[in-house]
């Protein structure tokens, strides 16, 4: 299947790729956005061209105010409502009552527990009936993504994952946003290249890796939240 899909989209423009896949996986295709620059490019490609692909986000409850603002601007710009998935309130209450609001700073296990509750489990619900999951991953984002492929089998969710921006550079992303007047998170103008939850994200310093601001206290080779772990 993956080889067939790779051949089918070869030579097509990104919006043509998305349109083809929306027809092949009608009703069983979705795109997950965190409202970062890459995700806003894909959202624009889908919504501007009225391609029938569900766009959803995982609201962890710990996002920046600026992220909620770009979410609202995106809804207003495209006259669409991006679907939200939230963490299970029982699990979230238990975590906070037992370990407090900043347990993720204490150990990697604690951080992964928080990510599992706030992101991984909601994603599993979002992808329950989805056969093709679209993401905004790029190969140059971090050392954990250098071997990224256009299509990959995601065993965790028994779905195929499509990474349309795999070979895009950050400059290409920025050029697309500027050319098409795409709403974007104002934190990007303040050195935040990769934006996640507020307590776990800082601005990137000059010369640092694109994702250096995410979980900056951890080993770079282990800095994934669990959504894209192979």
Image (cartoon, rainbow, N blue to C red):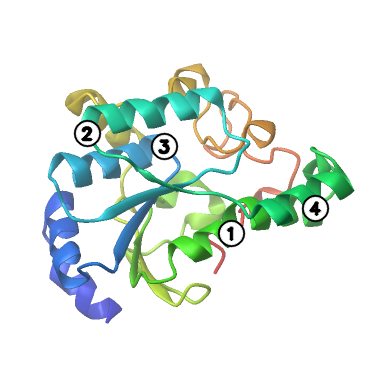
The residue tagged 1 is 120
* Marks 3 & 4, CB-CB < 8 Å contact: no
- Work out whether residue 75 or residue 104 is closer to the camera in this orientation and state it: 75
Name the residue rendered at 21%, 47% in the picture: 46
The residue tagged 4 is 94
* Marks 4 & 1, CB-CB < 8 Å contact: no
On the picture, is 126 further left or further right than 205?
Answer: left
* Quadrant housing residue 60: top right
Q: Earlier in the sequence, mark 2 or mark 1?
A: 2
Name the residue rendered at 54%, 24% in the picture: 65
* Marks 2 & 4, CB-CB < 8 Å contact: no
Q: Earlier in the sequence, mark 4 or mark 1?
A: 4
The secondary structure type at the circle numbered 1 is helix
Q: Earlier in the sequence, mark 3 or mark 1?
A: 3
Q: Earlier in the sequence, mark 3 or mark 4?
A: 3
* Quadrant housing residue 42: top left
The residue tagged 3 is 35
- Work out whether residue 157 or residue 6 is closer to the camera in this orientation and state it: 157
* Front position among marks 3 and 4: 4
* Marks 2 & 3, CB-CB < 8 Å contact: no
Check the picture and name the quadrant holding the C terminus. Answer: bottom right
* Front position among marks 2 and 3: 2
The residue tagged 2 is 78
Quote the CA–CA distance across marks 2 and 3. 14 Å
Name the residue rendered at 28%, 36% in the picture: 172
The secondary structure type at the circle numbered 3 is loop
Category of crowding for the residue at label 1, using alpha-carbon neighbours closer than 10 angstroms: few (below 14), some (14–19), many (at least 20): many
Which numbered dot is residue 25? none
């Amino acid at each position: 299947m993956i080889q067939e899909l790779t051949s089918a989209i070869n030579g097509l423009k990104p919006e043509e790729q998305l349109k083809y896949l929306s027809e092949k996986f009608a009703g069983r295709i979705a795109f997950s956005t965190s409202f970062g620059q890459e995700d806003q490019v894909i959202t624009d490609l889908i919504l501007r061209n009225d391609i029938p692909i569900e766009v959803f986000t995982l609201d962890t409850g710990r996002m920046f105010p600026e992220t909620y603002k770009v979410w609202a601007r995106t809804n207003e710009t495209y006259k669409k409502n991006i679907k939200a998935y939230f963490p299970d309130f029982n699990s979230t209450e238990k975590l906070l009552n037992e370990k407090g609001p900043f347990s993720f700073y204490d150990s990697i296990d604690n951080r992964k527990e928080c990510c599992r509750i706030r992101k991984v489990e909601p994603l599993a619900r979002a992808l329950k009936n989805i056969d093709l999951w679209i993401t905004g991953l790029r190969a140059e984002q971090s050392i954990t993504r250098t071997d990224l492929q256009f299509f990959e089998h995601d065993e965790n969710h028994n779905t195929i994952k499509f990474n349309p921006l795999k070979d895009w550079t950050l400059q290409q992303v920025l050029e697309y946003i500027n050319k098409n007047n795409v709403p974007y998170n104002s934190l990007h103008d303040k050195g935040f290249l990769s934006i996640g939850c507020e307590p776990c994200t800082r601005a990137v310093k000059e010369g640092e890796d694109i994702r250096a601001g995410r979980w900056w206290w951890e080993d770079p080779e282990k800095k994934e939240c669990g959504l894209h772990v192979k």
